[in-house]
Image (cartoon, helix red, strand yellow):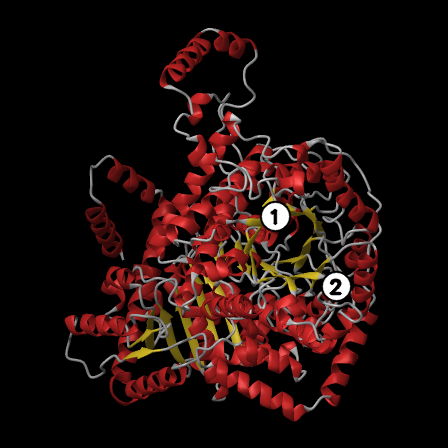
Amino acid sequence: MFDKEELNRIIKERERWEKTTLPKWVSRRPERKSEFKNLSEIPIKRVYTPEDIKDMDYTRDLGFPGEYPFTRGLHATMYRGRLWTMRQFSGYGTAEQTNQRFKYLLKEGETGLSIAFDYPTIRGYDSDHPTAKGEVGVCGVAVSSLKDMEVLFDGIPLDKVTTSMTINGPAAMLLAMYIAVGDKQGVPREKLGGTTQNDMLKEFFAQKLIIFPPKPSVKLVTDIIEYCAKNLPKWNPISISGYHIREAGANAVQELAFTLYDGITYVESCLERGMKVDEFAPRLSFFFSAHNDFFEEIAKFRAARRLWAKIMRERFHAKNPRSWWMRMHVQTAGFTLTAQQPLNNIIRVTIQALAAVLGGTQSLHTNSFDEALALPSEQAVRIALRTQQIIAHESGIANTIDPLGGSYYVEALTNEMEEKAMDYIQKLDDMGGAIPAIEKGFFQKEIADSAYKYQKEIDEKERIIVGVNEYKIEEKYPIEILRIDPKVEEEQVARLQKLRRERDNRKVKEALEKLHYEAEKDVNLMPTIIEAVKSYATLGEICDVLRDVYGEYRELIVI
Amino acid sequence: MHGERKIRVLIAKPGLDSHDRGAKIVARALRDAGMEVIYTGLRQTPEQIVETALQEDVDVIGLSILSGAHNTLFPRIMELLKQKGLTDVLVVAGGIIPDEDVPELEKLGIKGFFGPGTPTDKIVQFIFENAPKRS
Amino acid sequence: MSEIEEIVQGVLAGDRRSIAKAITVIENNPEKARRIIASIYPHTGKAHVIGVTGPGGSGKSTLIEKIIREYRRRGKTVGVVAVDPTSPFTGGAFLGDRIRMQELSVDEGVFIRSMATRNYLGGIARATKDAVKVLDASGRDVVIVETVGAGQSEVEIIKVAQTIVVVFAPGLGDEIQAIKAGVMEIGDIFVVNKADRENVDKSVMDIRAMLQLSNKEQAWTPPVLKTIALTGDGVAKLIEKIEEHRRFLEREAGREKAREKAETELVEAIKEKVASLMIEELEKEGEFESYLQKILRREIDPMSAAEKILKKKLGGC
């Protein structure tokens, strides 16, 4: 980006500065540490200059917003055209309560609904399963059958909303229920809009909400992508997620590399099915974390966009520019929230949200400051949303595109993160792909080591966390704790048992037998699953059939 | 020439949540402090936890939970421990447990509570000081 | 009743808490352990002891879970001793093998115990043997010993078993190469797990080829089986083979092998007993230290020192 002569002049000047000005200051005011590093262990230099990005080519590496390689942003107008989507994820209680809240949100002008499911649902168990005791409706809504989904969307026309479902293992079943509700409402399937998270690979080494073994899990993910490509053109079948990888302890480079590698694996699986890359790639979307190290995070988002564009174009030969797009949703890092002096979390969330916006995200969730203590209170949820609104409307950041583009530091860091991520991708290719790496415990070990290191640094005060290992106070922070009424479980179980009595059990049996038969063959299971949910077979029953065929999987534990 | 008595610890995760980052870090820290650590893996029922503690004859049980179901699960675990005669086992808890729930849980016999932000050496030290002395 | 008597009575009655305590004693107190073993010894020798070993990633633990389930279906009670290495740096250990068997922990007919290799007096192999005896005396029909990998000490541990099952997975070719020296000779049954993967037949062939290389004239030809532990495929067949091997031992080589085992145990016990007696006495007289110093100064080599000591001690008797 600089001509040779100018660069030489800069280098000479730097050498002079290091000999004259710098030593005087270092002797008078020694630096705080002998080495400065970011969270990915990348050493951070004292100062960055054109020398650090001397091999960079503006048009090749940065280009313009809306054009390959999208380093500066996916859209030509970015936030000058439309602000990012402020999508706050939440949910608890019964289907009725959630339905009420949805209706309230719709009245307030929101059109994007977001569903969190409770743990039994996420694990593919009905609300009356023995392990569900005490967990029904606690961290999300319980959906055990089409009946619950009907209640959830009662009076809400599915062609007027988009729905994001945070669901992985049983994604096929819950999407099937959503489609069934749409069918009952008479909404054409091509009008259904929304997202299923549907990213199983990261479950095996990060979030660990697993039902089936890796291979059939990826098969089900692929079934959904294929089915949506043919029938639900407005649906985002998958949100390839680095967020949970980060929360489990990975550093920024690992988050970036492992997420993209999961993406590569899904693309390969679709190609093996015989799909054409441009048929499905435009609908792939991503989900990242925004952590504490401000510039590192910004560089991560920029590097992710550029690297994905290259992978899609060069590795998979996608022709449609939309296939090169990495559309991303970002959530501020829940792990960074402290239980100590919880109001400080508002500041942390603000910094993280700023990084996400400066990194060019399409959509953002900001955490509530009290989430390290309990389910968030109403006031905390509101502040979290207001944080985004203040950034959007008051800070002026949204007025220009990629304002940090061209910063010597940010560009050098973007390059470095991309290179390090590519090293991991190479390593994973050499291992034979994501599934062998999972079975060897490679991801698990990498993540466990980073998590342990991070904690040790805090223990040894190499890393200061304000209010936790420094600047501590004696405090009792009064919080209102949201308790889930045990009635939620009783009512849910009662409804489920009533359903089991009243449905046509012969039809259910037939549907489940058909599913069993189909699952043993190598066919797309979505149509059969839709039939099964329409017969009111429960989530647990459907998953049991597949557990029987595929086996149940326990995660490999690497400490 | 006799090896000194090793402290055996069971790190258990009751409840359906899958946040095991903390549990694993603690397991590793205890191992690095010279203890023998048995980790149950995720989503253990109270019955499984207590039966494992019995078979492994552990000195300490560390319970980690973030799903909010501690008020349902912990009393059951403590009850089962009593039933099986494992009354001298030190039970400590970590995860997200609101302060106001602590007194009730203490009454059940749970001795240490280590919420988010606890340095691992504090947990190690607590266990060294409070693990039952057995011959 | 003394504490020891109470434990012994409990073990013989199959009481789970007593079994657990007995193994803890074995781990921590050789003197008391000896008394326990002496009391329960007449009640041992009934269980069939199965050793399962193989490289990490072969799906061993999952396979063991399925083996236990199959035995339970057949009405047998099962004990498991899972051995994991102690870290030489910290002295701590991570005992993770039971994770995959956790659902079975609430089954009254199953008892699972994890042991760390530690730095045992008499070695982990001895401690494992004793733990197996406790489970045997408690009335378990089958006792499974699990070790990871197949280094020298794992081979020593697993030798406690009557039937040794060695587990591989396809694509672990290098690992097979690396460990064949240790386990190919001791394996009675070989299993290629994860048989739904590619290259499974190649692995089976590789193992057969290696077995032929180490070919001795044998009355028992080790079979090579395929399993998919995740779904349980092939496990019933594996149990059949284990049972077949058990009958083979009873029929033919059993008595000889039992004699061999008893002999080894006796020899080892004498070695250990004599050594600790000698050392204890030498230490009392301060001679141990003086020999040590001489060896350090290279005035004498350890073997000659031992000879000298023996001559002096035994001569003086």
The answer as to whether the residues below labels 1 and 2 share one chain is no
Viewed as shown, does residue B106 lie left or right of A464?
Answer: right
Instruction: Please identify the quadrant where the N terminus of chain A is shown.
Output: top left
Vertical arrangement, residue B71 with respect to residue A523, above or below: above
Residue A171 location, quadrant: bottom right
Distance from disc 1 to disc 2, alpha carbons, whole Å, reads 35 Å
State whether residue A21 is above or below residue A534: above
List x then y, in percent, for residue B61. Answer: 63, 59
Q: Nearer the viewer, residue A75 or B43?
A: A75
Q: Position of residue A255 (x, y in %)?
A: 52, 47
Q: Which residue is mark 1?
A: B128
Image location (x, y in percent) of residue A143: 70, 72
Mark 2 element type = loop
Few, some or many residues within 10 Å of mark 1 (<14, 14–19, 20+)? some
Q: Give the label, 1 or 2, closer to the camera.
A: 2
* Residue at horizontal 51 percent and vertical 21 percent from the top: A47
C176 left or right of B18 in image: left
Task: Give the side of residue A197 with respect to residue A368, left or right.
Answer: left
Foreground of the two, A505 or C11: A505
Question: Which of the 4 image quarters holds residue A60?
Answer: top left
Of residues A128 and A171, the one nearer the viewer is A171
Expressed as whole percent of the image width and height from the top left, the position of residue C231 reads: 45, 78
Residue C187, labelled with which disc?
A: none
